C-alpha cells in the first residue's frame, strides 16, 4: 500500500499526465468547499491533507463522492458529473500546489 502511495505521489509531483478536470464542473461544485477548506474539506493543492484519503484508493473516494460523506452532500452537488469526472477532479485537488 505504501509503495502505491509513493508511486502516486511521485507521479503527481512529477507532473504525470492525469486527465484534466472539467474546470467548469469543478468551479461550480468542488471549489466551493475545497478552495477554503469549509466543513473540514481537504483543500485543493494540500497534498498532505489528501494523502490519507488517497491511501483508501480511488474507487473508495469516488464512492464517497457519490454517496456523500460528512458535510459533503451526495455527488458533491455535481449531478451531471461522471465517475471519470470525479476521478479527474480528485487527482487535480490532490496535486501539490505549485
Image (cartoon, helix red, strand yellow):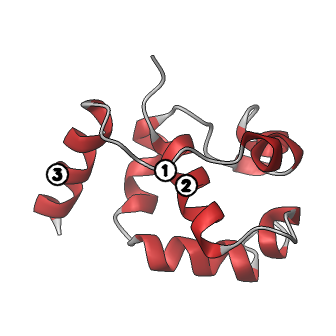
Q: Which residue is mark 2?
A: 88
Q: Position of residue 97 (x, y in %)?
A: 48, 23
The answer to whether residue 71 is seen in the rendering is no
Residue located 53% across and 31% down the image: 45
Q: Secondary structure at mark 1?
A: loop
Quick one: label 1 or label 2, which is nearer the N terminus?
1
Q: Which residue is mark 3?
A: 7
CA–CA distance between discs 2 and 3? 17 Å
Residue 80 pos. (x, y %): 85, 69
State which mark lies toward you, 3 or 1: 1
Q: Nearer the viewer, mark 1 or mark 2?
A: 1
The correct choice, above or below, for 30 with respect to 53 in the image is above
Please say if the residues under marks 1 and 2 sit with CB atoms less than 8 Å apart: yes
Residue at image point 53% right, 71% down: 61
Give the class, few, some or many, for how many residues have Cα within 10 Å of label 3's Cα (few <14, many ≥20).
few
Q: Which mark is residue 9?
A: none
Amino acid at each position: 500500500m505504501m509503495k502505491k502511495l509513493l508511486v502516486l505521489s511521485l507521479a503527481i509531483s512529477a507532473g504525470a499526465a492525469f486527465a484534466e478536470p472539467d474546470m467548469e464542473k469543478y468551479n461550480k461544485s468542488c471549489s466551493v468547499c475545497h478552495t477554503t477548506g469549509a466543513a473540514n474539506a481537504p483543500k485543493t493543492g494540500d497534498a498532505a491533507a489528501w494523502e490519507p484519503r488517497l491511501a483508501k484508493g480511488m474507487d473508495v473516494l469516488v464512492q464517497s463522492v457519490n454517496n456523500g460523506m460528512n458535510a459533503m452532500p451526495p455527488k458533491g452537488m455535481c449531478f451531471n458529473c461522471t465517475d471519470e469526472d470525479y476521478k479527474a477532479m480528485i487527482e487535480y485537488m490532490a496535486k501539490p500546489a505549485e
